[in-house]
Amino acid sequence: MTISAFGLRKKFGDHVVLDGIDLDVADGTVFSLLGPNGSGKTTTVQILSTLITADAGEVRIAGHDLRSDPDGVRSAIGVTGQFSAVDGLLTGEENLLLMADLRHLPRREGRRVATGLLERFDLVEAARKPASTYSGGMRRRLDLAMTLVGGPRVIFLDEPTTGLDPRSRHGLWQIIRELVADQGVTIFLTTQYLEEADQLADRIAVLDHGKLVAQGTAAELKRLVPGGHVTLRFADARGLDAAARALASTGRDDDALTLQVPGDGGVRSLRALLDELDRADVEPDGLTVHTPDLDDVFFALTGRPTLEEPAR
């Protein structure tokens, strides 16, 4: 595991922010931490990235112990926070060269890395322009490029697409996918966009009131809440009637010749449904599996319909 945390705890005064959370993030994957504002997401990132210390718990990142070897952790990670670290008075190229200097890269190596990142993030034409003139999407791309100057194995992205338009958001998603697929980078992502976690994350954890209330793939989490079903379509009314007699259905549409059957969308339940139809000698014309989305999961687990709440 690239990131392993056990019993992570943090209090600010009398307020418990993290109450003994355990996390495991595999190499070369995207892990997404979801939760309402004030649930402890940013605090978790700040602890794992050595910005603040935990009150208790054990953490290893890229083989380094967080408590005894924080410098080793820092050498292996990059962080892109909620607010851009770009200096608007500098050009894009100068921002990257500044990061190269901070990473103690030799001058020639720093220029080579900066040039490569400007090309990779489609910022060559804007390289000599002040970053203050960049669009929101360009600033975010530059911010992530600056994070990559040191070649980190682990990147913490804390709500990286907040405020971006859909085109810029999708562009950043593609960059994240390429980092994982092409370079084997591990991404630890917090986001207020449930679609973003659904699109990018190999595994998702939901944090609420300082506790992890669920972990798993997006598909596994969706099966935790009710509302999943299979819609069966039939070629004629006779097949529909036969299936309705054989199955415990919740919805029938005689005009559309469809039957809705409760199910979690899993392979096992789908196989059981098809076996039941075989025993009744009924063959549907087609079927569609419907599962709850992450909005349903989030509301069921936290009691709140969205992540976008006023900050505490």
Image: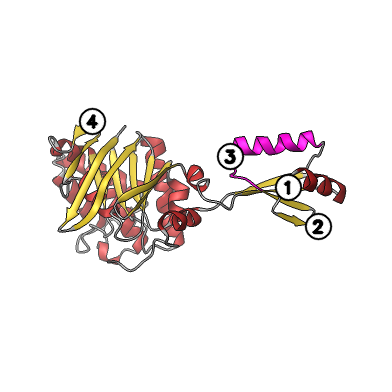
Q: Secondary structure at mark 3?
A: loop
Where residue 8 sits: x, y (%)? 23, 43
Type of residue at label 1? Leu
Residue 95 position by quadrant? bottom left
- Viewer-closest of 244 and 83: 244
Q: CA distance from mark 3 to mark 4?
A: 36 Å
Magenta span contains residue 269: yes
Q: Secondary structure at mark 2?
A: loop
Q: Is residue 181 above or below residue 256?
A: above
Type of residue at label 3? Gly
Q: Nearer the viewer, mark 2 or mark 4?
A: 2
> Which residue in the protein does label 3 denote?
266
Could you tell which of marks 2 and 1 lies nearer the N-terminus?
Answer: 1
> Which residue in the protein does label 1 denote?
232
> Which residue in the protein does label 4 denote?
63
Could you tell which of marks 3 and 1 lies nearer the N-terminus?
Answer: 1
Q: Secondary structure at mark 4?
A: loop
Could you tell which of marks 3 and 2 lies nearer the N-terminus?
Answer: 2
Q: Is residue 87 above or below residue 274?
A: below
Q: CA distance from mark 2 to mark 1?
A: 12 Å
Type of residue at label 4? Gly
Which residue is most to the bottom?
A: 310
Give me the disc on residue 254: 2
Type of residue at label 2? Asp
Neighbours of disc 3 within 10 Å: few (<14), some (14-19), many (20+): some
Q: Secondary structure at mark 1?
A: strand
